[in-house]
């Protein structure tokens, strides 16, 4: 009969084991896929960009599901001779609906949000490389395309 023993690390005396036991290795093997899944990229999508009539600025919204939290946010980006500038307009901690965006004129963007709920980082105006932008808000209607969002799977609210 052959006795099977776990190998001992160099310098260990008989009966000592500094190597993880098979049970610990099995536990570690079960945890690795869970840890990898928790480090996975969040699910997300973006609405179609809408450009201002003069072509200098465009806006779009993004929806991202981080697993433990979700956000829908609108962003603006403007281009000038000095580069591209932009930033966040508003963030909604939900995937319930997208954000309707429409340029009223080259410096005024209408932002339509689902009624009710929390709204974070609400901007009323910005200045990008001397270009002043204004944001006006209204309620998003259920019959507007943005109500459906950009295609990310909805989580239970």
Image (cartoon, rainbow, N blue to C red):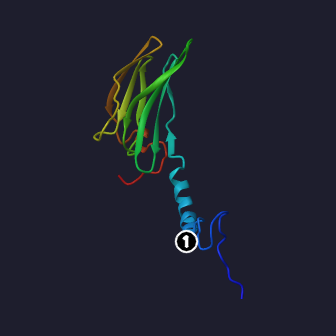
What is the x, y in percent for residue 9?
65, 64
Q: Is residue 121 above or below residue 26?
A: above
Secondary structure of the residue carrying tag 1 is helix
Furthest residue in direction left, as rendered: 116
Q: Nearer the viewer, residue 16 or 66?
A: 16
> Residue, x 62% and y 69% (percent of image)?
13
Q: Is residue 47 above or below residue 65?
A: above
What is the x, y in percent for residue 95?
40, 45
- Asked which quadrant contains residue 15, the reply is bottom right
> Residue, x 51% and y 16% (percent of image)?
54
Q: Nearer the viewer, residue 126 or 28?
A: 28
Q: Residues within 10 Å of mark 1 (few under 14, many from 20)?
A: few
Residue 28 horizontal side relative to residue 8, left or right: left
> Which residue corresponds to mark 1?
23
What is the x, y in percent for residue 31?
53, 61
Q: Nearer the viewer, residue 54 or 65?
A: 65
Residue 44 horizontal side relative to residue 1, left or right: left
Q: Is residue 93 above or below residue 40?
A: above
């Amino acid at each position: 009969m052959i006795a099977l023993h776990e190998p001992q690390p160099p310098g260990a005396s008989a009966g000592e084991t500094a190597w993880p036991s098979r049970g610990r290795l099995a536990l570690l093997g079960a945890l690795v896929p869970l840890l990898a899944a928790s480090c996975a990229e969040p699910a997300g999508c973006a609405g179609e960009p809408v450009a201002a009539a003069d072509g200098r600025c465009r806006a779009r919204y993004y929806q991202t599901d981080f697993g433990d939290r979700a956000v829908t946010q609108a962003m603006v980006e403007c281009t000038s001779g000095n580069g591209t500038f932009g930033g966040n307009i508003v963030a909604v901690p939900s995937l319930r609906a997208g954000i309707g965006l429409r340029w009223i004129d080259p410096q005024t963007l209408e932002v339509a949000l689902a009624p009710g709920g929390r709204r974070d980082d609400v901007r009323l105006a910005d200045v990008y490389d001397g270009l002043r932008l204004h944001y006006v808000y209204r309620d998003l209607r259920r019959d507007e395309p943005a109500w459906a969002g950009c295609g990310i799977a909805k989580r239970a609210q």
